[in-house]
Image (tube, rainbow, N blue to C red):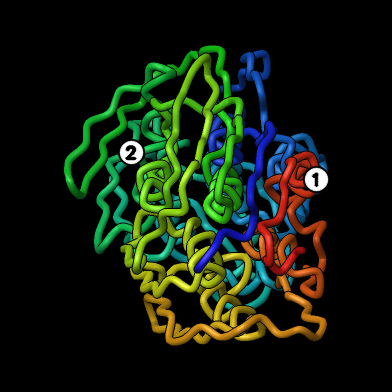
């Protein structure tokens, strides 16, 4: 990138509350039968609203649409409560595996019936959990299975002794769950491949939900594309429980400095530094893959992202989606079983280009900079951001930005 795409960009961006923290807190509230526990700054994301509605619904069949976290957490919570529900979702949800979780719950006496393909939604709970005890589970597909089990663990007779096999993906999300349990006084013991949670009473404390670092990544990307940036992000702090806060460290290579004060984050860029290449293992941070793949493509920075095999079973096959949509914009990539690597960078076409989002909120938000810089690039189904960041487009409009002279926007 010979020059920035924006001469300057500035303003305040109101990020959404953390969906990950909100959904975990809601699950704990449900398990503890404590509807009066004070939760401040609860997420208004579509996934969180679906989860809340599911917990108050009297229907036997619950449609969780494309909310994967809610689906996994509620499968465990309803089974723990002995509630015989049928959980279903969108066509894409019905292609996302759930067998590792239901197999783990079967080790506790629960039983399930699949209404479609074996191991995939829709799934019917035909018998709830009968006991606590030892459970073995592999950790290579989704950390949400482990978190779902941990959220019900202290409420089970004799607790839970969880043996975790294989290479773990998205470990910071398991850490997030454990930190939330510890915050509420839940005691547990852990080793590299085992977590023991005794049965115990749980009294919930008031909880202030911090804002979402994954959502902040899209704002950091915009700052990286500017020669000068000054952006305030309220609701973020340096002691974050969220793994994606690692982005602060990684974005330093793009010339962005981060400061904190009064639970606010201030990001600043005053130079045009950027790395000669960007190679990262994202095993622990898969939600940042789209942000950095698109940012590096815009800046024509060679990249190699590894440890992202589980992106193939997210809201869409994100590796295939990135490969397809970046090609439309002149970037050739190669998606492997566990990686995405840039091959070459061309020019963005002058003719109209429509970016498909595949009903995936992160596809829309990560590709947003292309639409802001190139007037001929349009994002399909922009409202898909409701899943995690309902105010995303409004917040982008509030940012003051001036295009660099000779840029695609001028």
**Count of numbered circles on the image:** 2
Residue 360 coordinates in the image, percent (x, y): 68, 64
Tell me what residue is drawn at x 71 percent, y 85 percent: 349
**Where does label 2 land, which residue?**
160
- Depth check, front residue: 65 or 199: 65
- Left or right: 396 in relation to 317: right
Closer-to-camera residue (225/185): 225
Across and down, in percent, residue 378 comes to: 80, 70
- Find residue 12 and name its label: none
At label 1, counting other C-alpha atoms closer than 10 Å, the crowd grade (few under 14, some 14-19, many 20 or more) is: few
Q: Is residue 253 visible?
A: yes
Q: Secondary structure at mark 2?
A: strand
Location of the C terminus by quadrant is: bottom right
Q: Earlier in the sequence, mark 2 or mark 1?
A: 2
- Residue 126 in view, yes or no: no
Q: Residues within 10 Å of mark 2 (few under 14, many from 20)?
A: many
Q: Which of these two is toward me, 54 or 18?
A: 18
Q: In the displayed structure, would residue 147 be above or below residue 41? A: below
Quadrant hosting residue 137: bottom left
Residue of label 1: 397
Above or below, 409 relative to 403: below
Q: Residue furthest front?
A: 405
Of 46 and 101, nearer the camera is: 46
Q: CA distance from mark 2 to mark 1?
A: 48 Å
């Amino acid at each position: 990138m010979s020059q920035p795409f924006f001469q300057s960009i500035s303003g305040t961006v109101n990020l959404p509350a953390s969906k990950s923290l909100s959904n975990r807190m809601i699950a704990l509230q449900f398990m503890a039968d404590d509807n009066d526990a004070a939760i401040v700054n609860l997420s208004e994301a579509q996934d969180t609203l679906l989860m809340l509605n599911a917990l108050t619904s009297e229907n036997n069949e619950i449609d969780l649409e494309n909310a994967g976290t809610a689906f996994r957490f509620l499968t465990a919570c309803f089974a723990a409560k002995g509630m015989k529900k049928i959980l279903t979702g969108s066509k894409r949800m019905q292609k996302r595996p759930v067998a590792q979780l239901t197999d783990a719950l079967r080790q506790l006496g629960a039983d399930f019936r699949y209404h479609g393909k074996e191991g995939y939604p829709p799934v019917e709970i035909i018998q709830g959990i009968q006991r606590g005890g030892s459970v073995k589970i592999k950790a290579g597909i989704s950390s949400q299975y482990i978190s779902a089990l941990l959220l019900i663990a202290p409420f089970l007779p004799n607790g839970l002794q969880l043996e975790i096999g294989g290479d773990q993906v998205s470990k910071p999300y398991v850490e997030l769950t454990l930190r939330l349990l510890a915050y509420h006084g839940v005691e547990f013991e852990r080793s590299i491949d085992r977590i023991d949670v005794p049965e115990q009473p749980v009294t919930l404390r008031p909880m202030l939900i911090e804002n979402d670092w994954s959502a902040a990544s899209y704002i950091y990307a915009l700052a990286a594309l500017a020669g000068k940036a000054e952006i305030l992000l309220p609701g973020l702090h340096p002691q974050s429980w969220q793994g994606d806060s690692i982005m602060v460290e990684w974005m330093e290579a793009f010339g962005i400095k981060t400061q904190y004060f009064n639970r606010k984050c201030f990001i600043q860029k005053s130079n045009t530094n950027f790395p000669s290449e960007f190679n990262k293992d994202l095993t622990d941070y898969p939600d940042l893959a789209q942000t950095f793949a698109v940012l590096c493509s815009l800046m024509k920075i060679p990249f190699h992202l590894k440890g992202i095999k589980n992106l193939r079973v997210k809201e869409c096959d994100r590796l295939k989606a990135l490969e397809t949509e970046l090609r439309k914009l002149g970037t050739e990539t190669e998606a492997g079983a566990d990686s995405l690597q840039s091959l070459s960078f061309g020019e963005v076409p002058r003719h109209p280009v429509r970016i498909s989002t595949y009903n995936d909120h992160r596809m829309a938000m990560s590709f947003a900079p292309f639409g802001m810089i190139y007037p001929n690039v349009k994002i399909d189904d922009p409202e898909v951001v409701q899943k995690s960041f309902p105010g995303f487009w409004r917040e982008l409009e509030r940012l003051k930005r001036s295009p660099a002279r000779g840029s695609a926007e001028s």
